[in-house]
Image (cartoon, rainbow, N blue to C red):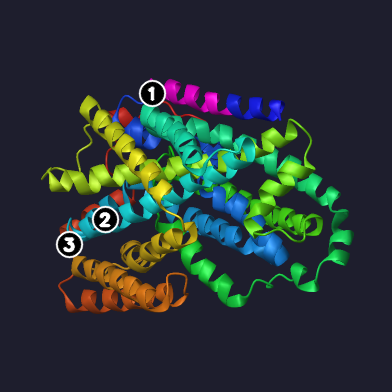
Amino acid sequence: MAVDYAVIIAYLAGMLAVGWWGMRRARSKSEFLVAGRRLGPSMYSGTMAAIVLGGASTIGGVGLGYRYGLSGAWMVFTIGLGLLALSVFFSARIARLKVYTVSEMLDLRYGGSAGVISGVVMWAYTLMLAVTSTIAYATIFDVLFGLDRTLAIILGGAVVVAYSTLGGMWSITLTDMVQFVVKTLGVLVLLLPIAVVKAGGFAEMKAQLPTEYFAPLGIGGQTIFTYVLIYTFGMLIGQDIWQRVFTARSDRVAKLGGTVAGVYCLVYAIAGAVIGTAAKVLYPDLAAADDAFATIVKDALPVGVRGLVLAAALSAVMSTSSGALIACATVANNDIWSRLRGVVGRGRDDEGAHDEVAGNRAFILIMGVAVIGIAIALNNVVEALTVAYNLLVGGLLVPILGGLLWRRGTAPGALSSVVVGGVAVVGLMAWKGILANEPVYYGLLASLVAYVAVSLATKPTDAAVLAAWRERLAGRTPVPAAEGTVPVG
């Protein structure tokens, strides 16, 4: 596998080089956290597709195809549907807000009193998302080099932390574009057709496998419904996704570029399920479904191609991991630490201040080290990710969408919605089990009831706050000079 090793090592070295180059561009808070809000459609589409399609979508998506057939596409498919819904219905308004975090949006909408607890919930979500992505390095580097789990996590995590810390969102954007190209070539152009041909084509696959492997709803209606609640709605409100929306140079780029990325996700979902189905024909008795991706890559692909496809898997993991890491650090610094320090004037954009960049860079490094440490200590990835998404959807979906869609929503209503939904989710997970469907169902319902009831029972949001909110939504708030620079991509 010398050639394959060379491909992977060159890829990792390239990521570090791009991170170093990105450091020269990230000279302001806006450049460091949201790439100067100046990405054009091509770069925006590529980076958005890269962040939402991570290790779970690639390795996990193929694993679901191995276990359930074509209906295994539903998990990644619902991610694509969520990105489409975000892009078509909400991204233009989100981009016009010119903020850095979801909690800042809540502060603007509700008058500055709803963002503290939401920041803590969002931080926990992005932290766990970064941890679960980092754990995936262990699987990939085990296939590549036979590395010990801990060493694999440290190696993969260190590369991501290094280029993210150096250049912030600029480095992540540039590496994501490389990762998007590698992922497209490795999974869609190479692995998909080779896997189908190796399995004897679709006719042979249908002859070898049970009929339910080709049923659109074979995975189960309740499972699909749960995927919609967790992943489709999760795409609408996650800081990691919103922070990419903030990088668009205009609301039109956010809408059209995100739509293209959403369609790409749908294609990627089907490709993963087909690869997994082909793997079931070739290797019917694997010990674990998630081993399907690594097995078919290792055994079915020629030298060189195998290295590129493994680099594609590494790309998928790195793009999600880096996006979650910068989101986690942004929330920790801007929504939690700055409040604890008693910082005032959160609406200011001190874009030229070096300490803004240095402070955010330090938080990425601190959060990155914490993520690697937690990843080494944690064993159950699925449970950690489930907790993160349950808290996100159960606690934050209602006040965020309510703020965008319902004028009568109030700060006490939003705060009670976050608390009641979060407590309901945690309590039900403790009672029914972390992997049960009920926590997100009833947590979301409790959050909605609390939001509507408390909002109607309390004084409407101040007219001046709503007027300022409408000005931001309409894009009539002046853009700082540091952000009005030359667009890219």
Q: Local crowd at mark 1 within 10 Å, few (<14), some, or many (≥20)?
A: many
Give the residue pinned by disc 2: 120
Horizontal side of 61 relative to 367 (left or right) equals: right
Q: Which residues are magenta?
A: 11-25
Give residue 438's quadrant in the image: bottom left
Looking at the picture, which amino acid does disc 1 mark?
Met
Horizontal side of 298 relative to 244 (left or right) equals: right
Q: CA distance from mark 3 to mark 1?
A: 43 Å
Q: Main secondary structure of the magenta part?
A: helix
Q: Nearer the viewer, residue 58 or 171?
A: 58
Residue 169: percent from the left, percent from the top? Answer: 40, 34
Looking at the picture, which amino acid does disc 2 mark?
Val
Q: Is residue 99 something that shows in the picture?
A: no
Q: CA distance from mark 3 to mark 2?
A: 28 Å
Give the residue pinned by disc 1: 23
Confirm whether the magenta stretch covers residue 18.
yes
Q: Is residue 202 something that shows in the picture?
A: yes
Identify the residue shown where x is 18% and y is 43%.
338
Horizontal side of 17 relative to 140 (left or right) equals: left
Identify the residue shown where x is 85% and y is 48%.
197
Q: Earlier in the sequence, mark 3 or mark 1?
A: 1
Q: Which mark is residue 347?
A: none
Secondary element at image label 3? helix
